[in-house]
Protein backbone atom coordinates (compact mmCIF):
# COMPACT_ATOMS: atom_id res chain seq x y z
CA UNK A 1 0.00 0.00 0.00
CA UNK A 2 1.38 3.35 -1.04
CA UNK A 3 1.19 6.34 1.37
CA UNK A 4 0.18 8.88 -1.29
CA UNK A 5 -3.58 9.03 -0.70
CA UNK A 6 -6.77 10.96 -1.45
CA UNK A 7 -9.92 10.68 0.61
CA UNK A 8 -12.93 9.75 -1.51
CA UNK A 9 -15.63 9.31 1.10
CA UNK A 10 -16.22 8.93 4.83
CA UNK A 11 -18.25 5.94 5.87
CA UNK A 12 -18.56 3.33 8.64
CA UNK A 13 -17.32 -0.21 8.96
CA UNK A 14 -16.76 -2.88 11.60
CA UNK A 15 -13.72 -4.23 13.39
CA UNK A 16 -12.88 -7.55 11.71
CA UNK A 17 -12.11 -9.09 15.11
CA UNK A 18 -14.75 -7.80 17.57
CA UNK A 19 -17.25 -6.66 14.89
CA UNK A 20 -17.81 -3.36 16.71
CA UNK A 21 -18.82 -0.44 14.51
CA UNK A 22 -15.98 1.88 13.50
CA UNK A 23 -15.65 5.07 11.49
CA UNK A 24 -13.94 4.31 8.18
CA UNK A 25 -12.69 6.09 5.11
CA UNK A 26 -12.39 5.20 1.43
CA UNK A 27 -8.94 6.34 0.35
CA UNK A 28 -7.42 6.30 -3.11
CA UNK A 29 -3.85 5.03 -3.22
CA UNK A 30 -1.64 4.50 -6.22
CA UNK A 31 -2.92 0.97 -6.75
CA UNK A 32 -6.61 1.34 -5.97
CA UNK A 33 -9.13 2.40 -3.34
CA UNK A 34 -8.80 1.12 0.20
CA UNK A 35 -11.27 0.95 3.07
CA UNK A 36 -9.31 2.03 6.15
CA UNK A 37 -10.51 1.71 9.75
CA UNK A 38 -9.03 1.61 13.21
CA UNK A 39 -10.31 -0.34 16.20
CA UNK A 40 -9.03 1.08 19.52
CA UNK A 41 -8.51 -2.47 20.74
CA UNK A 42 -7.43 -4.43 17.67
CA UNK A 43 -5.61 -1.90 15.50
CA UNK A 44 -5.68 -0.45 11.97
CA UNK A 45 -7.08 -2.40 9.01
CA UNK A 46 -6.77 -1.43 5.38
CA UNK A 47 -8.36 -3.47 2.57
CA UNK A 48 -8.45 -2.77 -1.13
CA UNK A 49 -12.08 -2.53 -2.29
CA UNK A 50 -11.65 -1.16 -5.82
CA UNK A 51 -8.77 -1.40 -8.25
CA UNK A 52 -9.69 1.61 -10.38
CA UNK A 53 -10.13 -0.52 -13.47
CA UNK A 54 -13.31 1.57 -13.67
CA UNK A 55 -13.34 5.02 -12.09
CA UNK A 56 -14.95 4.59 -8.67
CA UNK A 57 -16.24 8.16 -8.39
CA UNK A 58 -18.05 7.79 -11.73
CA UNK A 59 -19.41 4.41 -10.73
CA UNK A 60 -20.87 5.66 -7.42
CA UNK A 61 -21.74 9.19 -8.61
CA UNK A 62 -25.46 8.67 -7.88
CA UNK A 63 -24.81 6.89 -4.59
CA UNK A 64 -25.23 9.56 -1.93
CA UNK A 65 -23.23 9.04 1.27
CA UNK A 66 -25.41 8.25 4.29
CA UNK A 67 -26.55 11.37 6.13
CA UNK A 68 -26.12 11.71 9.87
CA UNK A 69 -29.52 10.19 10.68
CA UNK A 70 -28.98 7.20 8.40
CA UNK A 71 -25.50 6.64 9.79
CA UNK A 72 -26.96 6.64 13.28
CA UNK A 73 -29.50 4.03 12.19
CA UNK A 74 -26.95 1.50 10.97
CA UNK A 75 -24.82 -0.21 13.59
CA UNK A 76 -23.99 -3.26 11.47
CA UNK A 77 -25.50 -5.41 14.21
CA UNK A 78 -28.65 -6.29 12.29
CA UNK A 79 -29.84 -8.99 14.68
CA UNK A 80 -30.49 -6.50 17.49
CA UNK A 81 -31.38 -3.55 15.22
CA UNK A 82 -34.76 -1.89 15.62
CA UNK A 83 -34.04 1.08 13.31
CA UNK A 84 -35.19 1.67 9.77
CA UNK A 85 -33.30 -0.16 7.02
CA UNK A 86 -32.40 1.77 3.88
CA UNK A 87 -34.01 -0.53 1.30
CA UNK A 88 -36.99 -2.89 1.09
CA UNK A 89 -36.69 -6.58 0.34
CA UNK A 90 -36.15 -7.84 -3.17
CA UNK A 91 -35.24 -11.43 -2.38
CA UNK A 92 -35.50 -13.40 0.86
CA UNK A 93 -33.34 -16.45 1.43
CA UNK A 94 -34.75 -19.27 3.53
CA UNK A 95 -32.35 -21.95 4.71
CA UNK A 96 -34.23 -25.23 4.59
CA UNK A 97 -31.43 -27.56 5.62
CA UNK A 98 -27.89 -27.61 6.96
CA UNK A 99 -27.13 -30.81 5.09
CA UNK A 100 -25.10 -30.86 1.89
CA UNK A 101 -23.85 -33.52 -0.54
CA UNK A 102 -20.65 -31.57 -1.23
CA UNK A 103 -17.93 -30.23 1.01
CA UNK A 104 -16.78 -27.06 -0.76
CA UNK A 105 -13.56 -25.25 0.04
CA UNK A 106 -15.50 -22.00 0.38
CA UNK A 107 -19.06 -21.88 1.70
CA UNK A 108 -20.66 -18.78 3.19
CA UNK A 109 -23.33 -20.93 4.85
CA UNK A 110 -20.96 -23.54 6.26
CA UNK A 111 -23.06 -26.12 4.42
CA UNK A 112 -22.73 -29.71 5.52
CA UNK A 113 -21.54 -28.78 8.98
CA UNK A 114 -24.96 -29.30 10.50
CA UNK A 115 -27.36 -32.18 10.12
CA UNK A 116 -30.33 -30.65 11.98
CA UNK A 117 -33.16 -29.60 9.72
CA UNK A 118 -36.32 -27.57 10.39
CA UNK A 119 -39.60 -29.48 10.19
CA UNK A 120 -41.90 -28.90 7.22
CA UNK A 121 -44.50 -27.13 9.40
CA UNK A 122 -41.85 -24.82 10.84
CA UNK A 123 -40.77 -23.85 7.33
CA UNK A 124 -44.36 -23.25 6.24
CA UNK A 125 -44.78 -20.80 9.12
CA UNK A 126 -41.56 -19.07 8.07
CA UNK A 127 -42.75 -18.88 4.46
CA UNK A 128 -46.01 -17.24 5.52
CA UNK A 129 -44.07 -14.69 7.56
CA UNK A 130 -41.69 -14.04 4.64
CA UNK A 131 -44.59 -13.53 2.22
CA UNK A 132 -46.03 -10.85 4.53
CA UNK A 133 -42.81 -9.15 5.68
CA UNK A 134 -41.30 -9.22 2.19
CA UNK A 135 -44.57 -8.12 0.56
CA UNK A 136 -44.70 -10.97 -1.91
CA UNK A 137 -40.97 -11.33 -2.44
CA UNK A 138 -38.80 -13.57 -4.54
CA UNK A 139 -38.05 -16.40 -2.12
CA UNK A 140 -34.84 -18.37 -2.50
CA UNK A 141 -34.63 -21.80 -0.90
CA UNK A 142 -31.07 -22.38 0.21
CA UNK A 143 -29.10 -24.41 2.70
CA UNK A 144 -26.84 -26.35 2.90
CA UNK A 145 -28.13 -27.95 -0.27
CA UNK A 146 -31.91 -27.49 -0.46
CA UNK A 147 -32.43 -30.48 -2.77
CA UNK A 148 -31.39 -32.74 0.11
CA UNK A 149 -35.03 -32.35 1.16
CA UNK A 150 -37.57 -34.59 -0.55
CA UNK A 151 -40.32 -32.13 0.36
CA UNK A 152 -38.73 -29.14 -1.43
CA UNK A 153 -41.41 -29.21 -4.18
CA UNK A 154 -44.10 -28.98 -1.51
CA UNK A 155 -42.31 -25.99 0.04
CA UNK A 156 -42.14 -24.31 -3.38
CA UNK A 157 -45.88 -24.85 -3.86
CA UNK A 158 -46.57 -23.56 -0.35
CA UNK A 159 -44.55 -20.40 -1.04
CA UNK A 160 -46.48 -19.70 -4.24
CA UNK A 161 -49.79 -20.18 -2.46
CA UNK A 162 -48.67 -18.03 0.47
CA UNK A 163 -48.03 -15.11 -1.90
CA UNK A 164 -44.31 -15.23 -2.70
CA UNK A 165 -44.35 -13.98 -6.28
CA UNK A 166 -41.29 -15.86 -7.49
CA UNK A 167 -39.54 -18.99 -6.25
CA UNK A 168 -35.91 -19.91 -6.68
CA UNK A 169 -33.58 -22.61 -5.40
CA UNK A 170 -29.85 -22.17 -4.85
CA UNK A 171 -28.30 -25.50 -5.70
CA UNK A 172 -25.19 -27.40 -6.72
CA UNK A 173 -27.36 -29.22 -9.27
CA UNK A 174 -26.40 -32.79 -8.33
CA UNK A 175 -29.93 -33.96 -7.60
CA UNK A 176 -31.36 -32.02 -10.54
CA UNK A 177 -28.93 -33.92 -12.78
CA UNK A 178 -29.61 -37.34 -11.27
CA UNK A 179 -33.33 -37.22 -10.49
CA UNK A 180 -35.45 -35.98 -13.38
CA UNK A 181 -38.66 -36.86 -11.60
CA UNK A 182 -37.65 -34.46 -8.80
CA UNK A 183 -37.13 -31.69 -11.39
CA UNK A 184 -40.56 -32.41 -12.82
CA UNK A 185 -42.11 -32.13 -9.34
CA UNK A 186 -40.35 -28.81 -8.76
CA UNK A 187 -41.62 -27.49 -12.08
CA UNK A 188 -45.13 -28.65 -11.36
CA UNK A 189 -45.00 -26.93 -7.96
CA UNK A 190 -44.24 -23.66 -9.74
CA UNK A 191 -40.48 -23.27 -9.37
CA UNK A 192 -39.41 -20.29 -11.49
CA UNK A 193 -35.63 -20.14 -11.22
CA UNK A 194 -32.68 -22.41 -10.52
CA UNK A 195 -29.58 -20.63 -9.23
CA UNK A 196 -27.01 -23.20 -10.34
CA UNK A 197 -23.55 -23.07 -8.83
CA UNK A 198 -21.37 -23.14 -11.99
CA UNK A 199 -17.71 -22.22 -11.57
CA UNK A 200 -16.41 -22.95 -15.06
CA UNK A 201 -16.17 -25.38 -17.93
CA UNK A 202 -13.14 -27.30 -16.69
CA UNK A 203 -13.25 -30.02 -14.04
CA UNK A 204 -9.93 -28.88 -12.61
CA UNK A 205 -11.84 -25.87 -11.23
CA UNK A 206 -14.51 -28.05 -9.61
CA UNK A 207 -11.86 -30.27 -8.03
CA UNK A 208 -10.25 -27.20 -6.47
CA UNK A 209 -13.43 -25.47 -5.28
CA UNK A 210 -15.87 -28.33 -4.77
CA UNK A 211 -13.64 -31.36 -4.23
CA UNK A 212 -14.85 -33.40 -7.21
CA UNK A 213 -15.52 -33.38 -10.97
CA UNK A 214 -18.88 -31.76 -11.64
CA UNK A 215 -19.04 -30.32 -15.16
CA UNK A 216 -21.05 -33.18 -16.67
CA UNK A 217 -23.41 -33.04 -13.70
CA UNK A 218 -23.98 -29.32 -14.18
CA UNK A 219 -24.75 -29.76 -17.87
CA UNK A 220 -27.20 -32.57 -17.15
CA UNK A 221 -28.91 -30.36 -14.56
CA UNK A 222 -29.32 -27.62 -17.19
CA UNK A 223 -30.78 -30.13 -19.66
CA UNK A 224 -33.30 -31.36 -17.11
CA UNK A 225 -34.35 -27.83 -16.16
CA UNK A 226 -34.73 -27.02 -19.85
CA UNK A 227 -36.99 -30.02 -20.31
CA UNK A 228 -39.40 -28.62 -17.72
CA UNK A 229 -38.89 -24.95 -18.68
CA UNK A 230 -37.33 -23.83 -15.41
CA UNK A 231 -35.02 -20.86 -16.04
CA UNK A 232 -31.39 -21.42 -15.09
CA UNK A 233 -28.97 -18.81 -13.81
CA UNK A 234 -25.32 -19.88 -13.80
CA UNK A 235 -23.71 -18.71 -10.55
CA UNK A 236 -19.90 -18.79 -10.61
CA UNK A 237 -17.92 -18.10 -7.47
CA UNK A 238 -14.89 -16.30 -8.88
CA UNK A 239 -11.61 -16.97 -7.12
CA UNK A 240 -8.42 -15.31 -8.27
CA UNK A 241 -5.95 -17.86 -9.62
CA UNK A 242 -8.59 -20.60 -9.80
CA UNK A 243 -11.22 -19.48 -12.31
CA UNK A 244 -10.78 -15.75 -12.99
CA UNK A 245 -9.39 -16.80 -16.41
CA UNK A 246 -12.60 -18.76 -17.09
CA UNK A 247 -15.11 -15.88 -17.09
CA UNK A 248 -15.22 -15.63 -20.90
CA UNK A 249 -15.74 -19.38 -21.28
CA UNK A 250 -18.65 -19.27 -18.83
CA UNK A 251 -20.31 -16.53 -20.92
CA UNK A 252 -19.69 -18.52 -24.11
CA UNK A 253 -21.21 -21.60 -22.48
CA UNK A 254 -24.28 -19.56 -21.47
CA UNK A 255 -24.68 -18.36 -25.07
CA UNK A 256 -24.40 -21.97 -26.22
CA UNK A 257 -27.00 -23.14 -23.70
CA UNK A 258 -29.45 -20.27 -24.24
CA UNK A 259 -32.46 -20.20 -23.74
CA UNK A 260 -32.12 -22.96 -21.11
CA UNK A 261 -29.67 -20.61 -19.39
CA UNK A 262 -31.23 -17.19 -18.94
CA UNK A 263 -28.52 -15.42 -17.01
CA UNK A 264 -25.14 -15.49 -15.30
CA UNK A 265 -24.68 -14.06 -11.82
CA UNK A 266 -21.00 -13.84 -10.84
CA UNK A 267 -20.04 -13.79 -7.18
CA UNK A 268 -16.44 -12.79 -6.41
CA UNK A 269 -15.06 -14.76 -3.47
CA UNK A 270 -15.96 -13.33 -0.06
CA UNK A 271 -14.61 -14.54 3.24
CA UNK A 272 -17.84 -15.56 4.95
CA UNK A 273 -18.53 -18.85 6.70
CA UNK A 274 -16.05 -21.55 5.65
CA UNK A 275 -12.82 -20.59 3.92
CA UNK A 276 -9.31 -21.98 4.19
CA UNK A 277 -6.65 -20.04 6.12
CA UNK A 278 -6.96 -16.33 6.84
CA UNK A 279 -8.71 -13.61 4.83
CA UNK A 280 -6.54 -12.67 1.90
CA UNK A 281 -5.67 -8.98 1.91
CA UNK A 282 -6.20 -8.94 -1.82
CA UNK A 283 -9.90 -9.25 -2.63
CA UNK A 284 -11.06 -9.91 -6.18
CA UNK A 285 -12.99 -6.67 -6.56
CA UNK A 286 -16.14 -5.92 -8.54
CA UNK A 287 -14.31 -3.64 -10.97
CA UNK A 288 -11.61 -6.27 -11.48
CA UNK A 289 -14.34 -8.74 -12.38
CA UNK A 290 -15.88 -6.25 -14.82
CA UNK A 291 -12.50 -5.63 -16.46
CA UNK A 292 -11.83 -9.38 -16.80
CA UNK A 293 -15.33 -9.97 -18.16
CA UNK A 294 -14.87 -7.31 -20.84
CA UNK A 295 -11.37 -8.46 -21.75
CA UNK A 296 -12.31 -12.12 -22.05
CA UNK A 297 -15.54 -11.62 -24.00
CA UNK A 298 -15.35 -8.37 -25.98
CA UNK A 299 -18.32 -6.96 -24.05
CA UNK A 300 -17.94 -3.16 -24.02
CA UNK A 301 -17.47 -1.82 -20.50
CA UNK A 302 -20.22 0.76 -21.03
CA UNK A 303 -22.76 -2.09 -21.25
CA UNK A 304 -22.31 -2.74 -17.52
CA UNK A 305 -24.55 -0.68 -15.23
CA UNK A 306 -24.27 -0.09 -11.49
CA UNK A 307 -27.18 -1.33 -9.38
CA UNK A 308 -29.80 1.29 -8.51
CA UNK A 309 -31.59 -1.02 -6.07
CA UNK A 310 -28.64 -2.20 -3.99
CA UNK A 311 -25.47 -0.14 -3.54
CA UNK A 312 -23.45 0.47 -6.72
CA UNK A 313 -20.34 -1.13 -5.20
CA UNK A 314 -22.30 -4.32 -4.56
CA UNK A 315 -23.57 -5.07 -8.01
CA UNK A 316 -23.46 -4.57 -11.75
CA UNK A 317 -25.96 -5.79 -14.30
CA UNK A 318 -26.28 -5.88 -18.07
CA UNK A 319 -28.73 -7.18 -20.65
CA UNK A 320 -27.98 -8.72 -24.04
CA UNK A 321 -30.26 -9.77 -26.83
CA UNK A 322 -29.19 -13.15 -28.18
CA UNK A 323 -29.10 -13.23 -31.97
CA UNK A 324 -30.06 -16.21 -34.08
CA UNK A 325 -26.31 -16.98 -34.36
CA UNK A 326 -26.02 -16.89 -30.55
CA UNK A 327 -24.13 -13.62 -30.54
CA UNK A 328 -24.73 -11.16 -27.70
CA UNK A 329 -26.02 -7.71 -28.60
CA UNK A 330 -25.64 -5.27 -25.68
CA UNK A 331 -28.96 -3.65 -24.78
CA UNK A 332 -27.61 -1.69 -21.81
CA UNK A 333 -25.45 1.42 -22.07
CA UNK A 334 -24.22 3.61 -19.21
CA UNK A 335 -24.60 6.67 -21.46
CA UNK A 336 -28.38 6.29 -21.15
CA UNK A 337 -28.39 5.22 -17.52
CA UNK A 338 -28.89 8.58 -15.87
CA UNK A 339 -31.86 8.07 -13.55
CA UNK A 340 -31.21 9.67 -10.15
CA UNK A 341 -33.78 7.92 -8.01
CA UNK A 342 -33.24 4.46 -6.53
CA UNK A 343 -35.10 1.51 -8.01
CA UNK A 344 -37.69 0.28 -5.51
CA UNK A 345 -37.04 -3.31 -4.41
CA UNK A 346 -40.38 -4.59 -5.71
CA UNK A 347 -39.73 -3.21 -9.20
CA UNK A 348 -36.22 -4.62 -9.24
CA UNK A 349 -37.58 -8.00 -8.15
CA UNK A 350 -40.14 -8.13 -10.90
CA UNK A 351 -37.60 -7.12 -13.50
CA UNK A 352 -34.89 -9.63 -12.55
CA UNK A 353 -37.28 -12.48 -11.85
CA UNK A 354 -38.97 -12.06 -15.22
CA UNK A 355 -35.60 -12.20 -16.92
CA UNK A 356 -34.27 -15.08 -14.86
CA UNK A 357 -37.34 -17.25 -15.31
CA UNK A 358 -38.66 -18.58 -18.60
CA UNK A 359 -41.81 -16.93 -19.81
CA UNK A 360 -43.36 -20.02 -21.35
CA UNK A 361 -46.43 -18.18 -22.52
CA UNK A 362 -44.33 -15.60 -24.35
CA UNK A 363 -42.00 -18.28 -25.69
CA UNK A 364 -44.88 -20.36 -26.98
CA UNK A 365 -47.58 -17.91 -27.89
CA UNK A 366 -45.56 -15.49 -29.93
CA UNK A 367 -43.91 -17.98 -32.19
CA UNK A 368 -45.54 -20.15 -34.80
CA UNK A 369 -43.25 -23.07 -34.07
CA UNK A 370 -44.50 -23.23 -30.47
CA UNK A 371 -40.98 -22.91 -29.06
CA UNK A 372 -38.10 -20.52 -29.49
CA UNK A 373 -35.52 -23.32 -29.36
CA UNK A 374 -35.41 -23.65 -33.14
CA UNK A 375 -34.66 -19.95 -33.62
CA UNK A 376 -31.00 -20.33 -32.71
CA UNK A 377 -28.23 -21.83 -34.81
CA UNK A 378 -25.72 -24.28 -33.37
CA UNK A 379 -23.17 -22.44 -31.27
CA UNK A 380 -20.20 -21.44 -33.45
CA UNK A 381 -17.01 -20.64 -31.51
CA UNK A 382 -15.53 -19.20 -34.70
CA UNK A 383 -17.68 -16.05 -34.74
CA UNK A 384 -17.31 -13.14 -32.30
CA UNK A 385 -19.31 -13.60 -29.10
CA UNK A 386 -20.40 -9.97 -28.99
CA UNK A 387 -21.78 -7.90 -31.83
CA UNK A 388 -23.21 -4.40 -31.93
CA UNK A 389 -25.49 -4.88 -34.87
CA UNK A 390 -28.88 -6.34 -34.28
CA UNK A 391 -31.01 -7.90 -36.98
CA UNK A 392 -33.56 -5.43 -38.35
CA UNK A 393 -36.96 -6.07 -36.77
CA UNK A 394 -40.31 -4.44 -36.29
CA UNK A 395 -41.86 -3.38 -32.99
CA UNK A 396 -43.70 -6.67 -32.49
CA UNK A 397 -40.58 -8.75 -33.02
CA UNK A 398 -38.49 -6.39 -30.90
CA UNK A 399 -40.83 -6.60 -27.90
CA UNK A 400 -41.09 -10.36 -28.24
CA UNK A 401 -37.32 -10.79 -28.29
CA UNK A 402 -36.83 -8.41 -25.36
CA UNK A 403 -38.96 -10.82 -23.34
CA UNK A 404 -37.69 -14.15 -24.59
CA UNK A 405 -34.29 -13.63 -26.24
CA UNK A 406 -32.37 -11.79 -23.54
CA UNK A 407 -29.45 -13.03 -21.49
CA UNK A 408 -28.60 -11.12 -18.34
CA UNK A 409 -25.08 -10.89 -16.95
CA UNK A 410 -24.73 -9.52 -13.45
CA UNK A 411 -22.63 -9.86 -10.34
CA UNK A 412 -22.95 -9.38 -6.65
CA UNK A 413 -19.93 -8.61 -4.49
CA UNK A 414 -20.65 -9.67 -0.94
CA UNK A 415 -18.83 -8.15 2.01
CA UNK A 416 -16.77 -9.75 4.75
CA UNK A 417 -15.25 -8.57 8.02
CA UNK A 418 -12.40 -6.79 6.26
CA UNK A 419 -14.22 -4.86 3.53
CA UNK A 420 -17.65 -4.30 5.13
CA UNK A 421 -18.97 -0.82 4.43
CA UNK A 422 -22.15 0.07 6.33
CA UNK A 423 -23.26 2.45 3.57
CA UNK A 424 -23.53 -0.63 1.37
CA UNK A 425 -25.11 -2.79 4.05
CA UNK A 426 -27.74 -0.12 4.77
CA UNK A 427 -28.98 -0.30 1.16
CA UNK A 428 -29.03 -4.08 0.87
CA UNK A 429 -32.20 -5.62 -0.60
CA UNK A 430 -31.06 -9.26 -0.34
CA UNK A 431 -32.21 -10.61 3.00
CA UNK A 432 -31.97 -13.88 4.90
CA UNK A 433 -34.78 -15.02 7.17
CA UNK A 434 -33.68 -15.78 10.71
CA UNK A 435 -35.94 -16.11 13.76
CA UNK A 436 -38.64 -13.88 12.34
CA UNK A 437 -36.23 -11.19 11.11
CA UNK A 438 -35.01 -10.27 7.65
CA UNK A 439 -31.24 -9.82 7.91
CA UNK A 440 -29.12 -8.32 5.12
CA UNK A 441 -27.12 -11.17 3.55
CA UNK A 442 -23.66 -9.99 4.63
CA UNK A 443 -24.80 -9.28 8.18
CA UNK A 444 -26.31 -12.74 8.45
CA UNK A 445 -23.16 -14.54 7.36
CA UNK A 446 -20.57 -12.09 8.76
CA UNK A 447 -17.69 -14.05 10.22
CA UNK A 448 -14.95 -12.53 12.41
CA UNK A 449 -11.61 -12.61 10.62
CA UNK A 450 -9.11 -15.31 11.48
CA UNK A 451 -5.51 -14.18 11.55
CA UNK B 1 -54.19 11.89 -45.17
CA UNK B 2 -52.14 14.77 -46.57
CA UNK B 3 -48.85 16.20 -45.34
CA UNK B 4 -49.61 19.48 -43.55
CA UNK B 5 -46.48 21.09 -45.00
CA UNK B 6 -46.41 19.79 -48.58
CA UNK B 7 -50.13 19.14 -49.05
CA UNK B 8 -49.47 15.83 -50.82
CA UNK B 9 -51.00 12.46 -49.97
CA UNK B 10 -48.96 10.50 -47.44
CA UNK B 11 -48.03 6.89 -48.17
CA UNK B 12 -47.35 3.98 -45.83
CA UNK B 13 -43.67 3.13 -45.54
CA UNK B 14 -41.54 0.96 -43.27
CA UNK B 15 -39.87 3.45 -40.95
CA UNK B 16 -37.00 2.99 -38.53
CA UNK B 17 -37.37 4.42 -35.03
CA UNK B 18 -34.36 4.92 -32.78
CA UNK B 19 -34.44 5.12 -29.00
CA UNK B 20 -31.62 4.84 -26.46
CA UNK B 21 -29.26 3.55 -29.12
CA UNK B 22 -31.55 0.81 -30.45
CA UNK B 23 -33.63 0.55 -33.59
CA UNK B 24 -36.91 -1.06 -34.56
CA UNK B 25 -39.15 -0.44 -37.54
CA UNK B 26 -42.85 -0.11 -38.22
CA UNK B 27 -44.94 0.96 -41.20
CA UNK B 28 -46.35 4.47 -40.77
CA UNK B 29 -47.61 7.18 -43.14
CA UNK B 30 -44.80 9.27 -44.62
CA UNK B 31 -44.78 12.33 -46.85
CA UNK B 32 -43.14 11.35 -50.18
CA UNK B 33 -41.78 14.91 -50.53
CA UNK B 34 -40.41 15.98 -47.12
CA UNK B 35 -40.33 12.59 -45.39
CA UNK B 36 -42.33 13.72 -42.37
CA UNK B 37 -43.93 10.78 -40.55
CA UNK B 38 -47.38 10.62 -39.05
CA UNK B 39 -47.42 8.61 -35.79
CA UNK B 40 -51.01 7.90 -34.73
CA UNK B 41 -51.75 8.41 -31.03
CA UNK B 42 -52.82 4.78 -30.79
CA UNK B 43 -49.40 3.59 -32.01
CA UNK B 44 -47.55 5.98 -29.68
CA UNK B 45 -49.53 4.79 -26.68
CA UNK B 46 -49.28 1.09 -27.47
CA UNK B 47 -46.33 -0.39 -29.33
CA UNK B 48 -43.98 2.58 -29.09
CA UNK B 49 -44.65 2.98 -25.38
CA UNK B 50 -44.06 -0.74 -24.89
CA UNK B 51 -40.70 -0.63 -26.66
CA UNK B 52 -39.69 2.47 -24.68
CA UNK B 53 -40.57 0.81 -21.38
CA UNK B 54 -38.65 -2.36 -22.26
CA UNK B 55 -35.58 -0.31 -23.12
CA UNK B 56 -35.82 1.97 -20.10
CA UNK B 57 -36.30 -0.87 -17.63
CA UNK B 58 -33.35 -2.99 -18.62
Image (cartoon, coloured by chain):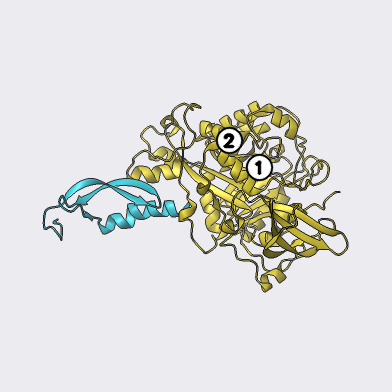
Chain colours: A yellow, B cyan
**Residue A226 position in % (x across, y down):** 54, 33
Tag shown at residue A142: none
Q: Residue at x 44, y 44 (%)?
A: A403
The one of A180 and B21 positioned closer to us in this rendering: B21
Distance from the alpha carbon under mark 1 to that under mark 2: 23 Å
Chain letter of disc 1 in the image: A
Q: Is residue A330 above or below residue B49?
A: above
Q: Tag 2, which secondary structure?
A: helix
Q: Which residue is mark 2?
A: A248
Answer with left or right where residue A98 lies relative to residue A232: right
* Number of numbered markers: 2
Where on the picture, by quarter, is residue A240? Answer: top right
SS under mark 1: strand
With respect to residue A449, does A80 lie above or below?
below
Q: Earlier in the sequence, mark 1 or mark 2?
A: 1
Q: Is residue B10 above or below residue A359?
A: below
Q: Residue furthest right?
A: A41
Question: Mark 1 touching mark 2, by CB under 8 A?
Answer: no
Mark sitting on residue A170: 1
Q: Is residue A300 left or right of residue A42?
A: left
Judge by depth and name the residue closer to the eye, A105 or B41. Answer: A105
In the figure, residue A176 lies in which quadrant? top right
Tell me, yes or no, if residue A190 can be seen here. Answer: no
Both marks 1 and 2 on one chain: yes
Question: Toward the viewer: B54 or A224?
Answer: B54
* Occupied quadrant, residue A163: bottom right
**Is residue A450 in view from this perspective?**
yes
Query: Badge 2 sits on which subunit?
Result: A
Q: Residue A249: percent from the left, percent from the top?
A: 59, 32
In the displayed structure, does residue A362 sit left or right of residue A95? left
Amino acid sequence: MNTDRTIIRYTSSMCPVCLNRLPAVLERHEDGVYLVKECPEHGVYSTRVWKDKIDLEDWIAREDPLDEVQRGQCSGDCRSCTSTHGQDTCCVILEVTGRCNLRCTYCFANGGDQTAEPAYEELCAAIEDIAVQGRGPLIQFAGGEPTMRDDLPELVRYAKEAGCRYTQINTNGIRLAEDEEYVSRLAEAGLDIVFLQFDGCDDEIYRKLRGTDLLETKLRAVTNCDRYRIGVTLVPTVVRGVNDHEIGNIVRKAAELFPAVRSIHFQPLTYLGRYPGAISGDHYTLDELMADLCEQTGIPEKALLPSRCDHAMCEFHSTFMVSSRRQLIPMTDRAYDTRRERTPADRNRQYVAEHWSRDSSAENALNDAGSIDGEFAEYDPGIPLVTQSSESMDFNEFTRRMRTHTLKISAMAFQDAMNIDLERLYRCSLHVYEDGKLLPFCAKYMTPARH
Amino acid sequence: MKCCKCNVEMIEKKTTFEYLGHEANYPVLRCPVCGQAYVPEELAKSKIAEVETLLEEK
